[in-house]
Amino acid sequence: MCQLYKSLYDLKHAFQTWYTQLSDYLLSIGFYASKLNTSLFILSMGNDIFYLLVYIDNILLIGSNLVLLHQLIQLLSLKFKLQDLKVVHYFLGIEVHPTTMSIMLRQDKYILDIFH
């Protein structure tokens, strides 16, 4: 039991260290942390805005300018090991459906999965 606790503690500590490094880096490149959600970071560049959401070791990065979005991904990949999964379709139980002017978020699949 003691070894299991130590392993779990080490995992938690490793995540906290990684999150602190990520947070510090995001703040250093111009993001600011949301006051309502500690896992949400926001970057405003002129008329463009970017949102970066962290959940455990998953990052969702969306923004209003595709060219700058790719530059941000490249910048982050210089500091952290990333795997760009391109367009998001499903994240944390939420289906993502982009439209021409917005993004529609739905949880139909998540709710049906719970019922089954």
Image (cartoon, helix red, strand yellow):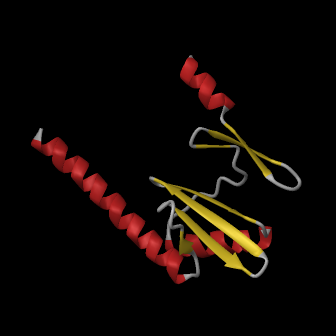
Q: Give whichever of 41, 81 is nearer the camera.
A: 41
Tell me the quarter of the image containing the C terminus.
top right
Res. 65 image quadrant = bottom right
Give residue 71's position: percent from left, percent from top.
Answer: 69, 74
Res. 114 image quadrant = top right
Residue at image position (58%, 24%) is: 113
Horizontal arrangement in the rendering, residue 99 relative to residue 91 (left or right): right
Q: How many labels does the image show?
A: 0
Give residue 70's position: percent from left, percent from top.
Answer: 71, 69
Horizontal arrangement in the rendering, residue 79 relative to residue 63 (left or right): left
Residue extending farthest to the right is 100
Residue extending farthest to the top is 116
Above or below, comparing residue 82 to residue 31 in the picture = above
Horizontal arrangement in the rendering, residue 80 relative to residue 48 (left or right): left
Residue at image position (29%, 53%) is: 11
Q: Give whichever of 18, 107 is nearer the camera.
A: 107
Give residue 87's position: percent from left, percent from top.
Answer: 73, 52
Res. 21 image quadrant = bottom left
Tell me the quarter of the image containing the N terminus.
top left
Give residue 81's position: percent from left, percent from top.
Answer: 51, 64
Residue at image position (55%, 75%) is: 32
Residue extending farthest to the left is 2
Residue extending farthest to the front is 36
Residue at image position (76%, 74%) is: 48
Q: Give whichever of 74, 18 is nearer the camera.
A: 18
Horizontal arrangement in the rendering, residue 77 relative to residue 45 (left or right): left
